[in-house]
Image (cartoon, rainbow, N blue to C red):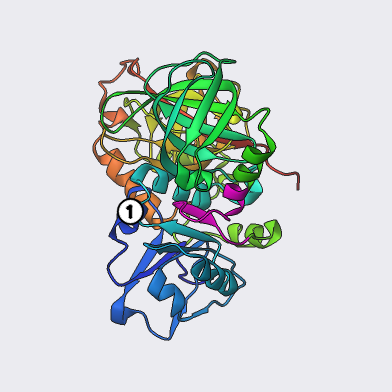
Amino acid sequence: MGSAPSVLLLDDGELDLVHRMLKRIGADYVRLQNRQIRGVVEKPRDLLVSSCERTLEMPQLESSVPLDPVWVCVHSQDFLPLRERLRELGVHYLVHSALDQESLRLFLVQILYRGPTRRKEFRLPLGDPVQCGPVDGELERGKLAELTSGFCRILVPRAVEPETALRVVLSEALGGKEKLELQGPVVRCAECESRSGQPAFSVLLRLDGLGSTARAQVDKLVRGEQIGTRVTPLAGRSPAAHQASACQPCAGAAQAPAEASSGGLHQRLPRFDYRRRVDVLDFDDMDASHTALGRDLSIGGVRIVEHSGLEVGAEVTLALYGGRREEPVVVEATVLRDDGENGVALVFNSLSDGQRHALEKLCSALPPVESLREGAKEPDGVVVAQVTASRRPQAR
């Protein structure tokens, strides 16, 4: 595969926000601008992001191996002829430049770290303001974080009990010239931290009993047929094609879990006392997510406690935070060893150069475990971490 990056960003300077977000999530990316974009460029492994102008004047993409990256076009205007043209070109998603930062982060992480073969249904991050409240009560402001044909996730200022019936009123822009009302019971409610520092709660709502008009509009949104959405799916991708792309090794990959199965990798690398709280939004299946507590961290792996029964060999996606204002480092990992009351040890899988750099930066701000005086116990302090997904490795 050579030096093909995971992400290729093509623009003329207008996609600085996307560029900053790729850096924050630790993506392995290359950005080409203006005269750097020649007639032939190397195709990325996972994701191609281009401005609208560059999309319509796309250079030839070449690769020595079969690759089928997701193609995202970032635009500032939305009209049907443009959508049809982009579909003809093979663009998969149309993203408005006004998409808020958190929704953009969710969108990129979902594509890069949770391929379509690992999720039941793509959650469309919209980031639009909504009105929400009890079915027979007053409405207050909230935010539509994600939408699928059967569920929506909203952010609200106060907690809501599970099974509470809520209604969510979408704007005319999403409702098709009329406000669209969705109703259903609360499946889960979890506290999260907003960028403003104000209390916020993530509420997952099951869309039950929608009328035919509301159901048709939700399906229209999910299919990408509604003008004005900030994230719009334009074309489907075959799971087999994505799986072939996703299984390609990352450039600069770390030692594979199989090679580290002796248990020595994490112990040989310098370990650091990882004591920071981690606040992570769920990217996919909320039923598969749970909170864990960290003990120590290295460039090669992490040890966690209160891990809700993770078994040796389980593959998971971890989000590791540094400071309060820093974006998380999102990595894939495999459970290497069960240490009983001391938790489980996980080894990171196929780190990109960007992920490795982000982990090195995170570790550099932590005190080393080895600096403890001889004979002293490990510190009792722990860090909250989030396991955002888990699955069993396929039999070979």
Judging depth in this view, the residue of 297 and 308 nearest the camera is: 308
Q: Quadrant of residue 280?
A: top left
In the figure, residue 120 lies in which quadrant? top right
Residue at mark 1:
23
Tell me the quadrant of the picture where the N terminus can be found.
bottom right
Q: Which residues are magenta?
A: 220-235
| Residue furthest front in the image | 178
Residue at 25% in and 28% down: 371
What is the x, y in percent for residue 325? Answer: 25, 36
Residue 233 sits inside the magenta stretch: yes
Is residue 75 placed above or below 362 in the rendered structure?
Answer: below
**Residue 372 visible to an observer of this rendering:** yes
Residue 197 percent coordinates (x, y): 26, 27
Is residue 255 visible in the rendered image? The answer is no
Going by the image, does 123 lie left or right of 266? right
Q: Farthest bottom residue?
A: 39
Q: Residue at x 60, y 27 (%)?
A: 287
Residue 51, image x, y percentages: 39, 68
For the residue carrying disc 1, how many other residues have a C-alpha within 10 Å: few (<14), some (14-19), or many (20+)?
Answer: some
* Residue 13, placed above or below residue 319: below
120 sits left or right of 52 in the view: right
Tell me: residue 361, above or below residue 241. above
Residue drawn 28% across the image and 20% down it: 374
Residue 165 placement (x, y as % from top left): 57, 18
Between 189 and 228, the one nearer to me in the picture: 228
Residue in the picture at 48% in, 56% down: 253
Disc 1, SS: helix
